[in-house]
Amino acid sequence: MAEYATQYSIKDLERLTGVKAHTLRIWERRYGILDPKRTATNIRYYDDAQLKHLLNVTVMLEAGRKISYIGSLSPDQLHEEVQNIFEEQVNAPKDLKYSARVNGLMVAMFEVNEFEFLNIISASVREIGFRQTILDLVYPFLEKVGIMWGINEINPAQEHFISHLIRRKVEREIDELAVPRNTGKKKYLLFLPEDELHELGLLLSQYLLRSRGFESVYLGQNVPYSDMVKVSRQINPDVLITFFIRAIPQNEIGEFLKTLCSDHPDQEVYFSGPGKFFEDVTVPKNGVLLKGLDHFEQLLEEQS
């Protein structure tokens, strides 16, 4: 079995932590925050342990610690201080900004730490409610996970662990909501194409729809196209929603969207996924590229 790759460039670290590469280089030289490794061809890279360490550093910075102090800590001391910050967060959640919370979720994923992950989520829900937690915390976290999928630097078992925790909480919240009927609002059909299995974005969309009183039919992951079309013709939705997460050629995405929009000329087709998937894709006239859940929430606000 091939060994799982765990190599990040400094630009990968910048995208995953929000800290500029220039700043990271200064921290590396001045405080020893990072210690790059080198490939056989002398190319610098960073591993999972260093990414996790850097995420912990950002949590401490957002909590008000100085980088000079952080750089003086041993790995064990740093871990202990971060744990103390998370305990403070439970009682005083406003003390930490959401960028730190997102990075805290990343650390919890790397450590497969359910207690820490759920504590961060729960603190946010108490402060701003579940819907806003989805928009301000969970979705930005999933976007970072998506970056890691894109550079092939995430252990699938870690992703499954986190997906299970989020799914469990979102499904519980959806079950608590009434099923809207005959509201006069637009009706939505949600599905993922065949072989597309990452449905958290779709599930979060379903929660936002239900929480705003929109009728919706949720088909879930890996839906054969012909089966989806049969349901669509039966219920006659106003909008179809789908996501692309797995890496497939842009021409295949373009052809799929062309067919989907052509088969549903009187409906709108909302779709989303990593931005790079759609750089060279021509969006059909009745297609709408969602730039994130906040964009979707804005569209729902306009329709309410």
Image (cartoon, rainbow, N blue to C red):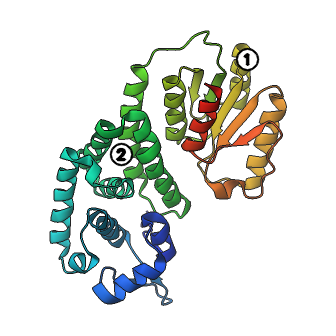
Q: Which residue is mark 2?
A: 161
Amino acid carrying mark 1 in the image: Asn
Left or right: 173 as drawn, with respect to 273: left
Q: Tell me, yes or no, whether the two marked residues, 1 and 2, touch with CB atoms within 8 Å.
A: no
Question: Of the residues tagged 1 and 2, which is closer to the observer?
Answer: 1
Give residue 98's position: percent from left, percent from top. Answer: 37, 53
Query: In which image quadrant can residue 45 be found?
Result: bottom left
Along the line of sight, the residue nearer the viewer: 270 or 214: 214
Give residue 192's position: percent from left, percent from top. Answer: 62, 36
Along the line of sight, the residue nearer the viewer: 180 or 91: 91
**Helix, strand or loop status at disc 2:** helix
Query: In the rendered view, would you say 44 is above or below 20?
Result: below
Q: Which mark is residue 236?
A: 1
Left or right: 41 as drawn, with respect to 288: left
Question: Mark 1 and mark 2: span between their CA atoms?
Answer: 36 Å
Quadrant of the snapshot with the N terminus: bottom left
Amino acid carrying mark 2 in the image: Phe
Left or right: 184 as drawn, with respect to 77: right
Give residue 260's position: percent from left, percent from top. Answer: 77, 34
Quadrant of the snapshot with the C terminus: top right
